[in-house]
Amino acid sequence: MIRIAIDAMGGDFGPEPIVAGVVEALKDTNFSAVLVGDSNAIKPLIPTHLLKNITFVKANEVVSMSDGATDALKRKDSTIYKSIELLRNKEVDAVVSAGHSGATMSLATLRVGRLKNVARPAIATLMPNSKDTTTLVLDVGANVDCKSEHLFQFAVMGEVYSKQILNRETPRVGLLSNGEEASKGNEVSKEAFSLISRLDSFVGNVEGNQVFDGSVDVVVCDGFIGNILLKTSEGVADAIGKIIKKQITKSPLAIAGSVLMKKVFKKLKKQVSYDEYGGAPLIGVNGCVIISHGKSNAKAIKNAVFQAINFANSDINKTIEEELSNFVR
Amino acid sequence: MIRIAIDAMGGDFGPEPIVAGVVEALKDTNFSAVLVGDSNAIKPLIPTHLLKNITFVKANEVVSMSDGATDALKRKDSTIYKSIELLRNKEVDAVVSAGHSGATMSLATLRVGRLKNVARPAIATLMPNSKDTTTLVLDVGANVDCKSEHLFQFAVMGEVYSKQILNRETPRVGLLSNGEEASKGNEVSKEAFSLISRLDSFVGNVEGNQVFDGSVDVVVCDGFIGNILLKTSEGVADAIGKIIKKQITKSPLAIAGSVLMKKVFKKLKKQVSYDEYGGAPLIGVNGCVIISHGKSNAKAIKNAVFQAINFANSDINKTIEEELSNFVR
C-alpha cells in the first residue's frame, strides 16, 4: 500500500483543511497516511473508523512563510523536515506539503537528492485551458536563474510527466518565448531551443497565450517567468471577475441575467480553480513530493494526495533518468 | 500645429482602417496629417473637405511581418523608413505605425537616435485593471536581454510618462518579480532593485497579478517577459470568454441570462480591448513614435494619433534626459 506523509501543520489555515482533505481522500482510496505535526491537535479531527489507516509522527515546529528557505535545513523538528526525512528513509513513498514551498524544495533537493542527470528539480503546475484540458507549465518558481541545459531537463521531465501521469500519448512540448518563430527568444531561450529540438515532442517556441488555448501539453520556462505567468493569469481572471461584478450591480437587468448564469460562472470558477488540480509536483528529486498552495482547502489537499498516489505508482523518475541519459555527452 | 506622419500601409489590413482612423481623428482634433504610402490607394478613402489637413508622401514598399527587422534599414522606399525619415528631418513631430514593430523600433533608434543617457528605448503599453484605471508596463518587446541599468532607465521613463501623459501626480513604480519581498528576483532584477531604489516613486517588487489590481502605476520588466505577460493576459481573457460561451450554449436559462448581461460583457470587452488605448509609445528615442498593433482598427488608430499628439505636446523627452542625468556617475 502506498504510504504518504502529509505535513499536517504547514498550510496558512493550520491543520483543519489539511486533515479534512486527507480524510476525504481516505474515504475514496486506500492508502496509508502519515500525518506529521502535533498529534494532539490533529487526532480530534479524524473520524475514529479511519484511524486504522493513519499513523502519526510528532513534529513540534512549523517553518513559517517569513522564514528563509535555507534556514529549513536547521529546523530539524519542523513538520517539513520530518516529512522529508520519512521520504529519505523510505518510510513513505511520497510527501504532500502546503507549507513553505521554498523550504520543501530545498529540503527535498538536499536531503532526498536529485535524479541522475537532473541539475535542478522543477515545480510543475497544471493550468486550465479553453479546450477543457490542462497545460503543464514548468518551472513555476523553483529556479529563478536558469541555464539552457536546465530548460532542456525541464522539457524532458515535463514530457515524461505528461505521458505517464496525464496520459497524453504524444505530448507536445513548447518553449515559452516572445514569438513563435525559431529566431525569437532571449540568449538563454535561444540556446535552449536548439537543445530541446533534439526531442521529438518539441513543437518549438510558444507564446504566453498558448498556455491557455490547448495547443500544447507542456510549456517550459524558468521559474522567475513561470511565477510571473502564474500570478499574471490569476490577476487577469480576478480583474475580469471584479469588472463583471461591478458592472452587474449597476443594472437590475444584469443582476437578473447573472442569476440565470449562476451555473455558468460556477462551472468557470471550478475550471480555473487550483483546488481541482491539487498540488504542484516537484519533479527531478529522487522521490515524490507534491507542493500544495498555502491556502489549500480540503478539496485541494485531497486532490494533491491523489496526485501523490499516481506519481508514486508510476515509473516517472526511472523514465526521466533513462531519457536524460540518452543526451549525456 | 502638430504634424504627424502615419504609415498608411503597414497594418495587417492594408490602408483602409488606418486612413479611416486618421479621418476620425481629424474630425475631433486639429492637426496636420502626413500619410505615407501609395497615394493612389489612400486618397479615395478621404472625404474631400478633410484633404486640406493632409499631405501625402509617396513610398512604394511595405516591410512585411515576415521580414527581419534589420533588413528595414535597407528598405529606403518603405512606408516605415520614409515615416521615420520625416521625423529625423523634423518635417513631422511624431510617427504612428501599425507596421512591423521591430523594424519601426530599429529604424527609430538608429535613424532618429536615442535620448541622452538612454541605452535602450522601450515599448510601453497600457493594461486595464480592476480599479478602472490603467497600468503602464514597459518594456513589452523591444529588448529581450536587459541589464539592470536598462531596467533602471525603463523605470525613469515610465515614471515620467505616467506623470506627464497619464497625469498621475505621484506614480508608483514597481519592478516585476517572483515575489514582493526585496530578496525575491533573479540576478538581473535584484541588481535592478537596488538601482531603482534611488527613485522616490519606487514601491519595490510587484507580482504579475499587481499589473491588474491597480496597486501600481508603472511595472518595469525586460521585453522578453513583457511580451510573455502581454500574451498571457490576452490568452487568459480569451480562454475565459470561450469557456463562458461554451457553457452558455448548454442551457436555455444561461442563454437568457447572457442576453440580459449583454451590456456588461460589452463594457468588459471595451475595458480590456487595446483599441481603447491606441498604440504603444516607443519611449527613449529622440522624438515621438507610437507603435500600433498590426490588427488595429480605425478606433485604435484614432486613439494612437491622439496619443501621438499628447506625447508631441509634452516635455517628456526633455524631462527623461534631465532625470537620468542626475544618476550618471
Image (cartoon, coloured by chain):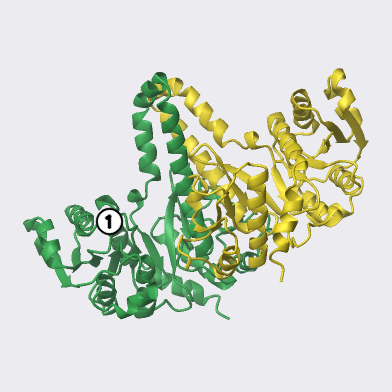
Chain colours: A yellow, B green
Question: How many numbered marks, from 0 up?
Answer: 1
Which sits in the foreground, A69 or B243? Answer: B243
- Please identify the quarter of the rendering in which residue A202 is found: bottom right
Using the rendered view, name the quadrant where residue A190 is placed. Answer: bottom right
Q: Residues within 10 Å of mark 1 (few under 14, many from 20)?
A: many
Q: Is residue A68 found left or right of B242 in the rendered image? A: right
Q: Position of residue A274 (x, y in %)?
A: 62, 37
Chain where mark 1 sits: B
Q: Is residue A285 found left or right of B287 in the rendered image? A: right
Question: Image check: B68 left or right of A151?
Answer: left
Residue B258 horizontal/vertical position (percent): 38, 26
Q: Secondary structure at mark 1?
A: helix
Provide the residue designation for mark 1: B301
The three-letter code of the residue at mark 1 reads Ile
Q: Position of residue A311 (x, y in %)?
A: 74, 42
* Residue B57 position (above or below residue A157): below
Q: As displayed, is residue A54 above or below residue A238?
A: above
Q: Is residue A25 left or right of residue A252?
A: right
Q: Nearer the viewer, residue A173 or A100?
A: A173
User: With respect to residue A76, does B78 lie above or below?
Assistant: below
